[in-house]
Amino acid sequence: MTDEVRRGDGNDTVSNKITGGLFVGAVIQGRDITVQLPEQIAPALSGLPPRPRSFAGRKDQLAELLEALAPDQSCRAAMAAISGLPGVGKTQLALQAAYRALDEPDWFPGGALFVDLQGYDDERRLSPNQALGSFLRALAIPREHVPDELEDRARLYRTVLSTYAEHGRRILVIIDNACSAAQVRPLLPSDASTAVLITSRGTLDIDARLYDLAVLTSSESVDLIRQVLWRARGYDDTRVDDAPTDATEIAQLCGQLPLALDICAALLADMPSRPLVSVKRSLLEAHTRLRYLCREDRAVQASFDLSYEQLTASQARLFRLLPLNPGPDISSQAAAHLADIDEDLADEVLTDLARAHLVDPGDVWGRWRMHDLIRLYADGCGRRHAHEDLRDQANLRLIDHYDRTAKAAVDRIEARSESPSLFADHDEALAWLETERANLVGIVTVAADDGRDDTAVSLAADLSWFFHRSRYLDDWVEVGTTALAASRRIGDRDGEGRMLSNLGSALKEARRFEESIGLLEAAASCFREVGDVNSEGAVLCNLGAVMVDARQYDEAVDVLKSSMTKLSGASPQSEVVMLTNLGLALTSTRRYEEAVSVLAGAASHARRIGDRRREGMSLLGLGETWAKLGRFEDAVNALTVAMEIFQETGERRREGSVLSILGETLGQVNRTDEALEVLATAVAVLRDVDDRQLEGRALAILGSILRQAYRFEESIDTQREAASIFRGIGDYYRKGVALAEAGEVLQDLRKFEEALDAHKAAAAIFHTSGDIHNEALAQASIGASLVELKYFDEAIAVLTPVVATLREVSDAACEGVALANRGFALRSIRRFDEAVVNLASAAAIFREIGDQHREYMAAINLSAALQGQISQ
């Protein structure tokens, strides 16, 4: 079988060929994670910063690093930590070693991962959780599969690296600019193959080989200046050799720091007629101004001052304003708004700043970034010149730019306005949101900190759609939290209600159901207080849906009925949504007849108002409910129409969901081949749209139908894959369902020890979830496995409370099976009187429900128990 997965922009297709029972995709099982790799390395694995433009000295350290990075037959992993003062060239050495190692054949066929932790910038520092998220996405782990918690991300990351190594794709990890061991430890691999280079200003206690980097020697420093001039002006530039004393003094005044030397050399390269003595004099003056500073980085400060003093007034002003931008880079367009100049002039000024090495060009033209030290230096200059630069007004212009443009992008995508747009089309608007995402997240906080709480709230509301669509759940929660606090400072209860609802929706998507419920309840309270009945009803409708996801079915029904009252005068679309949610909640509480009535009404209402999408949603729920009532033909018809609607409207995610339920329904009427075909399509569709939760559900259903087709090994593999997906996204309840089904298949294969483990894991999950019925079913299966393993006393102890629970929930068929298994166990340990009672009760239940096969088996065991009773 061949399976194709398309993610992101559709260009990164992964094909997995399955033979011999191998798993497809990323599989997580229990506490141990097994990953089946894609056949192609993700492009992000070659995403190193550019090779250092100039590099001098460090020959001994470079040789040692390369020796450590070489493949080691002793399976000793290389981990090197390079430390030293700011500007000493730590990153340059790490990158030089990385590029040379990557040039060696077969050293790192898996490529390299790089992250700048920005450890010494309090505002932009990356947490280990954020860094792991980026690494996992670079390693081809889908966004939906990346866990929320740090421990889970670290475990998955280490397993993926180990699996790459096991498959001959050893990876080099470069962790740059770390501030502490705590920031680094979660990013360290656990296997004995993956190599790591770490840079930090301090010595980190991480059990790595330490390289304390000193400044360059005088001759190495002079050679660095010479290399920069030769690279820029050619070998005809002989200024260093013509004035060796001046070159040596410049090196000394720069503290022999590579960063400072590179800036000075660049200034000389910009002006081929400038003699070295001119730079030396400027450095002497700067050094004099800083004579009272005792910090070891004073030479870097002097170099920054020197470069800064060469700027024109317009260049210096933009340089001082750039740190106001909250993200890691800035566009020329945003810089133009910041400085209140046109974009062409902004490009020109930024190009000049890049020439002076005070900003760096981004990966694409029109984007710019600053080294963290230069950013801090520029911010200090900006604060000193805040009045003359009109810094506060510049900050407001930047906030307004991002707010206005984000609103225009969302309006363009959702076609909310017919007026001329800043964006040519949907794709351009979406691309802008993607590119500026980090800046947009940061600007919400900037606006709130600057007293622009109203802007923070409105921008958060606009961005919620984008975060939801692109599944940037961490960003959605962060922005929502900031905006909620801003709305409360304003004292606007209506706005607070909307932010509570927004954040509650974000937490729902992140599957943090309890938190979501609390926020949505608070939102309803806000709307109730201000008398906004329609908004209150809409929130209650959403709250009911979250409660269904949280398996609080009875509470969901009550809330949705209350929502129905509130929304009596609301839009027809809102009424359809409310009725659909209510029908689904009723289905979950097994009130199937009521659910059918409500869902049929919702579908009819949607049809009358011409809302095809909502009609499809209602029919999906109706088909699923009819199947539970045994009205399979009606179910297939409803689901088929729903599938056609979603195909018509282009909603592939909904189409995949319908196909899953349709496949399950076809399996229930023994149309097994059709069911398998439909479910294979469902899995392919859901992988294509990258919906891990629905993909897991489709795989779980597929596993059940494969069992029905006696394809047991495939069934187990599929259920385990489903369980791994559910664990990865935090849906532990559905993981339990998949494990329980896998346990049943293992019993079919008479692998009773494995079945016992699967059922115990499922029972624990159901117990935690409060699902008494499914917990009892899992315990009944545990008892059945114990009987097969001849652990009769343990089986009786497990099955005794199970029989009572199944009787309470009116599950006669399963109660009969539990009684039969307990009777067999009692007979086996010669407790014949009790065995007769249990087996007779089981036979009576099977007779009543018409299960002739089980009745026959119970009767045979009953006869044996009676004979044993007589013999006693």
Image (cartoon, grey):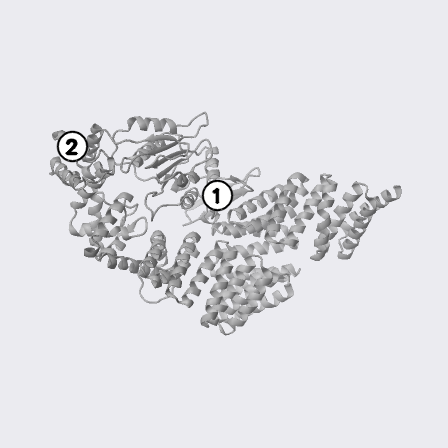
Q: Amino acid at mark 2?
A: Glu
Of 850 and 3, which appears nearest the observer?
Answer: 850
Of 714 and 166, which appears nearest the observer?
Answer: 166
Image point (57%, 44%), residue name: 720
- On the rendered structure, is 797 left or right of 586? right
Q: Amino acid at mark 1?
A: Glu
Which quadrant would residue 252 be assigned to in this image?
top left
Image quarter in which the C terminus is found: top right
Q: Secondary structure at mark 1?
A: helix
Circle nearer the N terminus (1, 2): 1
Whether residue 428 is visible, yes or no, is no
Q: Residues within 10 Å of mark 1 (few under 14, many from 20)?
A: few
Give coordinates of residue 611: x percent, y percent: 49, 67
* Numbered label attached to residue 151: 1
For marks 1 and 2, give the CA distance: 51 Å
Q: Which residue matches tag 2? A: 249
Image quarter in which the N terminus is found: top right
